[in-house]
């Protein structure tokens, strides 16, 4: 395990899955042509629309998303994260699932989002993810990506729960994926600082794919897909338009940071 390029993709997904898959492939291809070996798609990469349509599409969309990730990973020879897509969970509910696929098309890990976004935003918009999404029942996994590093998974609202990332760090994660569709209102104040905090306190790289712009005339997302190093330095920022943030991940640098700032070794969990 040495150095490689990681890309956090940024999309403006719509209620049209065909258009979304086409836009996603365009960015995956661009990342691969630039040399990325680890690529992440944001939350809701295949569909951003109203809940009723998402529920009706979920059975077909779940199968299509999984097949798409395998096809893209093989076609462009990248390890690929699908950062969140709906999977039927019974009783008119879905899971919000992230799936990590190797460049050979092998599913390395799956994670169903456990923290659901039920929040009244001060700008007057109310979000109730729990009305249509069932929370996952398992902690997010940490997986060895052959030839790259150990990767821990999470999704969007999880970033506000530092104990989840401490679990991932304790399980050996060297890189934390945080795919998101972060609201514009909270994102302007919280997105970057939360991601930097998760990187610093766990001395791990953070790769955060993002949604951006206006979706189906109602929802505004923040953008700024980021790659952050274990010191908290922002290495790449995708800005406000569709595109990507790409930067080198150097495992030796990560280990040097952990040696210089050995806070993970100094924890006294018995006191908490």
Image: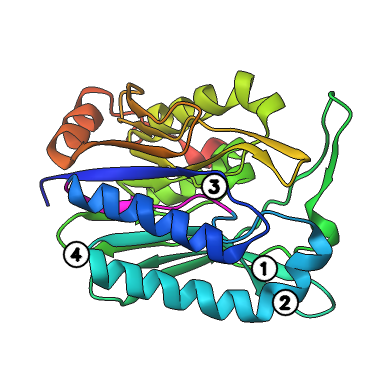
In front: label 3 or label 4: 4
Q: Which residue is mark 1?
A: 95
Q: Residue at x 63, y 80 (%)?
A: 60
- Rounded to the nearest whole Å, what is the CA distance between mark 1 and mark 2? 6 Å
Q: Which residue is mark 2?
A: 89
Do residues under tags 1 and 2 come within 8 Å of each other at their CB atoms?
Answer: yes
Left or right: residue 126 versus residue 155 is right
Instruction: Indicate the quadrant containing the C terminus: top left, top right, bottom left or bottom right.
Output: top right
Where is residue 258? Give x, y as percent: 25, 32
Q: Specify start and end residues of the magenta stretch as a single range.
A: 35-43
Classify mark 1: residues with Cα within 10 Å, few (<14), some (14-19) or many (20+).
many
Where is residue 21? Give x, y as percent: 49, 62
- Rounded to the nearest whole Å, what is the CA distance between mark 2 and mark 3? 23 Å
- Rounded to the nearest whole Å, what is the CA distance between mark 1 and mark 4? 27 Å
Query: Does residue 102 appear anywhere in the picture?
Result: no
Q: Quadrant of residue 200?
A: top left
Q: Which residue is mark 4?
A: 146
Classify mark 3: residues with Cα within 10 Å, few (<14), some (14-19) or many (20+).
some
- Rounded to the nearest whole Å, what is the CA distance between mark 3 and mark 4? 24 Å
Query: Does residue 33 appear anywhere in the picture?
Result: yes
- Rounded to the nearest whole Å, what is the CA distance between mark 4 and mark 2? 31 Å
Q: Which residue is mark 3?
A: 164
Classify mark 2: residues with Cα within 10 Å, few (<14), some (14-19) or many (20+).
some
Q: Residue at x 67, y 68 (%)?
A: 95
């Amino acid at each position: 395990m040495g150095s490689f390029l990681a890309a956090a993709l940024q999309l403006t997904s719509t209620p049209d899955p065909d258009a979304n898959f086409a836009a996603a492939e365009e960015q995956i291809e661009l990342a691969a042509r630039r040399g990325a070996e680890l690529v992440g798609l944001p939350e809701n990469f295949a569909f951003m629309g109203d809940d009723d349509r998402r529920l009706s599409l979920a059975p077909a969309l779940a199968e299509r998303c999984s097949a798409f990730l395998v096809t893209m990973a093989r076609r462009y020879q990248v390890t690929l994260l699908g950062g969140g897509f709906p999977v039927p969970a019974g009783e008119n509910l879905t899971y919000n699932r992230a799936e990590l696929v190797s460049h050979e098309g092998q599913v390395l890990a799956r994670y169903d989002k456990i923290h659901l976004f039920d929040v009244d935003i001060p700008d007057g918009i109310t979000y109730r993810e729990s009305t249509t999404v069932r929370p996952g029942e398992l902690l997010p996994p940490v997986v060895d990506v052959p030839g790259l590093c150990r990767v821990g998974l999470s999704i969007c609202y999880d970033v506000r729960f530092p104990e989840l990332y401490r679990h991932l760090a304790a399980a050996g994660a060297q890189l934390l994926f945080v795919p998101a569709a972060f609201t514009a209102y909270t994102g302007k104040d919280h997105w970057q600082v939360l991601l930097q905090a998760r990187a610093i306190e766990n001395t791990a790289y953070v790769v955060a794919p993002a949604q951006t712009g206006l979706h189906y005339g109602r929802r505004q997302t923040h953008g700024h897909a980021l790659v952050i190093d274990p010191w908290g330095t922002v290495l790449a920022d995708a800005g406000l338009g569709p595109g990507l943030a790409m930067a080198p991940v150097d495992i030796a640098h990560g280990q040097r940071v952990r040696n210089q700032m050995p806070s993970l070794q100094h924890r006294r969990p018995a006191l908490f």
